[in-house]
């Protein structure tokens, strides 16, 4: 078991305790430690109030002070330290109306989502496990802390988090927990799309997504999510980890008459650009029949994109999307073509638009873009040497 990150954070817990307060590691880091999984972030919970934490440490950042979270900066690392808290009623299925700071660890962990995330651990690696979370980890069960319907009524995102944990860990969802997911799934309509996208992206990347995708359909999850609810998601087949962008591209490509707006997902422009790129690439792969066209494809889309698409060929084929003839388009051929490219981008061409205009004594216009593209293609296909004098000859002969 990897203790390094806990040992690095131990001085923070020790300092809190030396000032008369309790402090424990909590949440996902403890769960992953007990499962012998990689640990990324250490979260700390304490009986000290936010003001008391600020008084104890020299360098703090009040990132979420009103909710009890102070960022403690120690040896150039940031650690989230959160005060034990209890919560008032949830009226919007997303966040509590009030947060109360308390001094009792039990009151803090009883409000958490799943038993495996409600285990606290001290600097001696002794656990405080009030709800049988360690046993549930050993039995590979996803179980809510307390009544499942209450937990999901409080925050509907917990439903998606539970499914995401199943996708990542391969655990079974306990019967009553799953029943409550069914009963409260409609509440996910109250969630912000940003929160949904974060969880859905992690879920889709999970090793066990093949077990979870059918559950998303069975629970009618997509019926409550903008953009997705416009598509027939039962016509989409997912049985291996997949990026959100590729899933969106498959949906749009297979159901082109559906007018879903990517803007509804509030994803970044870069993500939208990637989705549209995959969509265009599917079209080109569908009709690709010769090495010459493949050479341009490798140049235009790059090795990482094409290599990823080829690794996803089973999923694409199950969704009736071609990745090209395997004798033409395969990992070996695209790597060989990539390594053989004379240029890797347009700026590598030994001429520019200004020189072309001077050579032809013409004014600029849309035609120039077409000329540059034709030069680019000729160089890529070894029909033209990437030398300025040769390109000028070609321009005079062909434009």
Image: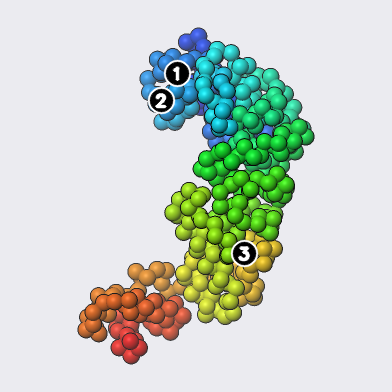
Q: Position of residue 270 (x, y in %)?
A: 45, 54
Q: Residue at x 52, y 24 (%)?
A: 97
- Residue for point 71% across, 26% down: 147
Q: Secondary structure at mark 2?
A: strand
Q: Quadrant of the C terminus?
A: bottom left
Residue placed under numbered mark 2 in the picture: 62
| Marks 3, 1: nearer the viewer | 3
User: SS class of the residue under badge 1?
Assistant: helix
Residue tagged 1: 50
| Residue at point 51%, 27% (across, down) | 8
Image coordinates for residue 199, horizontal then vertical, percent: 58, 42
Dot placed on the residue nearer the N-terminal end, 2 or 3 = 2
> Where residue 196 sits: x, y (%)?
56, 42
Instruction: From the viewer's side, name the closer residue of 200 and 207.
Output: 200
Tell me the colour scheme of the image: rainbow
Look at 66% across and 55% down and name the residue there.
Answer: 233
Residue 33 percent across, percent down from the top left: 63, 31
Residue located beneath label 3 in the image:
254
Left or right? Give the position of 100 relative to 149. left
Residue found farthest to the bottom: 397
């Amino acid at each position: 078991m990897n203790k390094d990150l806990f040992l690095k954070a131990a001085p923070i817990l020790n300092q809190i305790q030396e000032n008369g307060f309790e402090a424990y590691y909590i949440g996902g880091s403890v769960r992953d430690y007990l499962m012998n999984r990689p640990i990324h972030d250490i979260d700390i919970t304490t009986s000290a109030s936010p003001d008391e934490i600020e008084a104890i440490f020299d360098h703090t950042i009040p990132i979420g002070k009103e909710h009890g979270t102070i960022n403690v900066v120690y040896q150039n690392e940031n650690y989230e330290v959160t005060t034990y808290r209890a919560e008032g009623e949830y009226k919007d299925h997303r966040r509590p109306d009030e947060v109360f700071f308390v001094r009792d660890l039990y009151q803090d962990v009883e409000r958490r989502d799943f038993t495996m995330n409600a285990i606290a651990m001290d600097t001696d690696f002794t656990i405080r496990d009030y709800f049988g979370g360690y046993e549930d980890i050993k039995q590979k069960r996803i179980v809510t802390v307390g009544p499942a319907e209450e937990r999901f009524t409080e925050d509907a995102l917990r439903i998606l988090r539970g499914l995401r944990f199943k996708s990542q860990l391969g655990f079974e969802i306990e019967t009553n927990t799953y029943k409550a997911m069914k009963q409260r799934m409609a509440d996910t309509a109250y969630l912000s799309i940003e929160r949904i996208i974060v969880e859905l992206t992690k879920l889709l990347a999970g090793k066990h997504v093949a077990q979870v995708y059918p559950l998303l359909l069975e629970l009618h999850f997509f019926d409550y999510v903008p953009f997705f609810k416009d598509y027939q998601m039962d016509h989409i087949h997912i049985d291996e980890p997949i990026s959100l962008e590729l899933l969106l591209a498959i949906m749009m490509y297979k159901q082109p008459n559906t007018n879903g707006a990517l803007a509804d997902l509030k994803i970044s422009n870069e993500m939208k650009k990637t989705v549209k790129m995959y969509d265009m690439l599917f079209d080109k792969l569908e009709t690709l029949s010769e090495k010459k066209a493949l050479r341009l494809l490798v140049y235009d889309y790059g090795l990482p994109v094409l290599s990823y698409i080829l690794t996803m060929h089973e999923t694409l084929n199950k969704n009736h999307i071609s990745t090209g003839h395997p004798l033409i388009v395969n990992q070996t051929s695209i790597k060989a073509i990539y390594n053989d490219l004379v240029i890797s981008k347009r700026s590598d061409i030994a001429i520019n638009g200004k020189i072309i205009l001077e050579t032809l004594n013409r004014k600029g216009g849309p035609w120039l873009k077409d000329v540059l593209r034709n030069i680019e293609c000729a160089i890529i296909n070894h029909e033209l040497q990437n030398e300025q004098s040769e390109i000028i000859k070609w321009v005079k002969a062909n434009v």
